[in-house]
Image (cartoon, coloured by chain):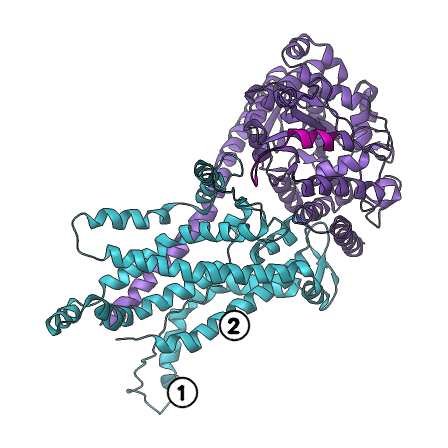
Amino acid sequence: MNGQPVPQKTTTPMANVNPSGFWKRSKNFRVAMLYLFPSFLLFSVFVFYPMMKTVYLSFFLTDYEGFPSLFVGLENYAYIFQSESFRKSIIATFIFVLITVPFGVLLALFLALLANEKLKGIGFFRTIFASNMGMSVAASSVIWLFLFHPSIGAFNQFLATFHLPQVEWLLDPSWAIISVSITTIWMNTGFAFLIILGGLQNIDEYLYENANIEGAGYWYQLKRITLPMLSPTMFFIITVSLINAFQTFGQVDILTQGGPAESTNLIVYSIYREAFINYQFGPASAQSVVLFLCILVVTILQFKFGEKKVHYQ
Amino acid sequence: MKLRQTLSMWLLAMFILVLGACSNGDAKQEEGDAASKEETTEQTEETKEDGEVTEVVFWHAMGGDTQVTLEEIVEEFNKENPGIEVNPQYQGTYDESITKFRSVGGSKDAPTIVQTYEIGTKYMIDSGFVEPVQTFIDEDNYDISQLEENIINYYTVDDTMYSMPFNSSTPVLIYNKDAFAEVGLEADKPPRTFNEIKEAAEKLTKKDGENVERAGFSMLNNGWFFEQLVYTQGGYYVDQENGRSGEPTKATFNGEEGQRVFNWLNEMNEAGTYGNFGSNWDDIRAAFQAEKTAMYLDSSAGVRGIVDNAPFEVGVAYIPHPDEVDPQGVAIGGASLWMSSGIEKAEQEAAWEFMKYLQTPEVQAKWHVETGYFAINPTAYDEQIVQKEYEKYPQLKVTVNQLQDTTSTKATQGALISVFPESRKQVVTALEKLYEGEDPQAALDEAAKQTDRAIEVAERSNK
């Protein structure tokens, strides 16, 4: 499902083509197919087949055993587009994406720039910043659940010591989406940090040396060297974060179960609810198809406009 | 050169990502599978050794301390019955367990016994994956009348007992006696009606400026409590007399009875005397123990834990009812045990033995005092361990009395609909909207509308 944004520039050498026979001319193609075969096989079983099946199911209603029993055409699509709950879910998802992706990536960039400095003991900080990568979604959500606890949570206790008004972190619909976003940003920072740090380390030293000789300041170097050289990495991490944000599930399930008043009912959670609580695989599949199209459009847009700003050396 | 390096770094990162994602999801599953496989092989070996042990796979949803008690009971049974080996397997929450059962129901892989929550009753009957326990009651001339009448009523559909009740609970009002004394309320005379609760809540609420330090009254955002407050007024959740006399077609919980409940909650919420602690059982219990709320509705199964952990005197009372209505009592919550169809007869009979064993007074007495669930067999209440426990926890007695005071009607028998889990979710959403200031009637109507649609879809697709 994840579109993998590896910007490949095909450089197949077509020099030694012998025009005499089709068999010989297609040699490259056949070799390519041979190499691609294993991944095609795996993709077919684990990606293409389930995708096709999802599209198929979206035209049906299912019985108690989950088998498609009644063909309803586009009714499931008509239903979800009329349903207020689905519209809320789409809006919540976009709000969530707009909060988590920019803040998450900027935070990771900031930490990576700090950790890229050559200081004594910086390895310790690099480890710490990347350490939450090792935590599962479930474990970190439970920790945050305690922090957000309405009566005995650390955040509210903290506010209480300074006589500040209590915040209903997960119970107030407008706060809940922010709380889930904070949790998500925290959880994703480790991975983004590591990738960006890798990108920073990959920038050639001599560029900075030259700049130093020329007398360029830190901010100038950051703007003219670091960020342009980092752009492929940033492009990658933004794309992956976007896709991840659209597919968020675990933290919602543990923190809010889509509530209060459906304010955090992100689309994947809504699909889960439809399929595994309501046992309606038809409407659930229709939602999945819509999600797939959303991600597809966003990814294409990003490649079309975002990639122009990417500087490949 | 640079490009290739960056590329390979990405690929590596993607690889780690994919690997991480896979292992996250599957590791637990595999662990579980491996463990259960081990168990199964162990048991098959045993079977081969003496040739006549029947294995009964028992899926349950009892976690925590309750699981420990349940496993002790099973162990005792296995010791007493050398020919039968009951193998209890924890399958997660009720929702998870029923989802898993859906995928194996009716096949050879189905467990012999599966524990399902009360609101799954209708689904289980309609699924065709189960053998009514009535079959065995008739074959065995088992005397069902020895069991608690109000519990039996819930699980009897069209004069057929489909499943064996096992862990039953009802809602109760739990309150902080010290707080009552502090504001001059009589601690031994808990409020009974909606208005009494409202007035008491007003007195009990403590505010520090805008901050509510202690709310007067709270209720978990769970459809179960709403259902109970409707039933106690004699109201129906769905038409066809709560789905008890025919296939229900429409939700009726947005009628007069439901409106009274929503209006009552709304008035307290607007007055700032209502505390909303979300939909998690542990959260509201923690709130009560931390004295963030003075009264709340809980399950009778939670009473013992609360009394043990609260740093103040805890009172337990019947659930409230509107002033103008005579209370009819409560419907059963909890779960019952279902027998799979399509498995070997010998296995079913072994499972039946186990079910009968669970209903004996001794087992029920242990179950009752250690978990707080009711004794399905009321003679268990005369057992000595129960009597001794009541001296220590007189509050437990209130829960039993409330159940025995219940008038059995189609309302207090509880509703039967196959899409109950979905409908309950809708009611939770309606409650959450209500607390955010939406009009009570509008919120309730929306939940009813969604329930109607769910009923209609289920009806169309399961012809």
**Residue occupying the far front of the picture:** B209
Q: Is residue B68 magenta?
A: no
The total number of labels drawn is 2
Residue A82 in view, yes or no? yes
* The disc label shown at residue A22, or none: 1
Distance between the Cα atoms at labels 1 and 2? 38 Å
Q: Quadrant of the rendered structure where residue A82 is? A: bottom right
Amino acid type at image mark 2: Val
Q: Residues within 10 Å of mark 1 (few under 14, many from 20)?
A: few
Q: Residue at x 77, y 33 (%)?
A: B194
Q: Secondary structure at mark 2?
A: helix
Query: In the picture, which chain is cyan?
Result: A
Is A78 above or below relative to B419? below
Identify the subunit bearing mark 2: A
Q: Is residue B250 left or right of residue A79?
A: right
Q: Nearer the viewer, residue B366 or B199?
A: B199
Q: Residues within 10 Å of mark 2 (few under 14, many from 20)?
A: few
Q: Is residue B304 left or right of residue A130?
A: right
Specify start and end residues of the magenta stretch as a single range: B197-211
